[in-house]
Amino acid sequence: MSFNIFTKPTKAFQYEIENPSVVRAIIFVVATSLVISLLAFLVGGTIEIAGILLLTNILQWLVLSLVLWIFEFMFSPKKGKIHEMSFKEATSMTGKLWLVMLIGAISLILWVILSSIGLSILGLVLFTLVGIFFIIDSYIMVKVSLDITTKRAIIPWILIIIVYVLLLTFIINFATATLPIF
């Protein structure tokens, strides 16, 4: 089992294609959601905001998995011999990406703690490094999932990032317009 998404992300994502596990992905997503909810609660949020963050993070994971699964049909280079990635594989791969987000959320908590003792630059450096790894790992996830060996994977990767940002913006705008706690 390969969880090394920092130094061997290609092997980690290939493992998810060979041995997909929705349960493992759900564990990563829920753990990330709990850490993000804890962070929101620590910086002055309420328990309702923490619960909403938990639900929206799960929704983001499902939608991003769906988009990756649909992009497999659109961008896969094997037109004659279809590489049919199942939705289970897509959820498993995006769940592995949520492992990077979990480490990013933990680094945000460390940033908050370190800033209270005057070492906020260390937290900033750690969070920046995790952000760089997230960008690299998301590109490799798209490359592995779509089975693209050339630089052509950049187009679906950019589209996935755009869809993710639009989804996040929609959820935040919907929450601020409809929920009284924001």
Image (cartoon, rainbow, N blue to C red):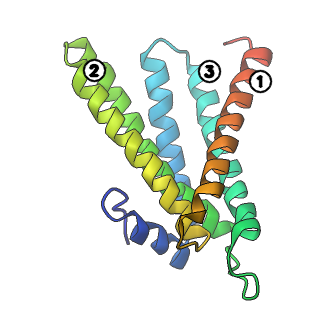
Task: Please tell me whether mark 2 or mark 3 is closer to you in this view.
Answer: 2
Q: Which residue is mark 2?
A: 113
Q: Kindly report the distance in space between the C-alpha atoms of the residues bearing marks 2 and 3.
A: 23 Å
* Residue shown at the point (69%, 73%) measured from the top left: 76
For the N terminus, give its image quadrant. Answer: bottom left
Whichever of callouts 1 and 3 sits on the residue coming sooner in the sequence is 3
> Helix or strand or loop: what does disc 3 sit on?
helix
Q: Earlier in the sequence, mark 2 or mark 1?
A: 2
Rendered position, 30 above or below 178: below
Identified at 74% across, 30% down, the residue is: 170
Q: Residue at x 51, y 70 (%)?
A: 16
Disc 3 marks a residue whose amino acid type is Glu
Badge 3: residue crowd in 10 Å (few <14, some 14–19, many ≥20): few
The residue that disc 1 covers is 174
Find residue 104 and report its horizontal and vertical position in percent.
40, 38
Question: Callout 2: 10 Å neighbours few (<14), some, many (20+)?
Answer: some
Q: CA distance from mark 1 to mark 3?
A: 15 Å
> Of label 2 and label 3, which has the lower sequence position?
3
* Residue that label 3 marks: 48
- Element class at badge 2: helix
Q: Is residue 121 left or right of residue 177?
A: left
The foreground one among 175 and 68 is 68
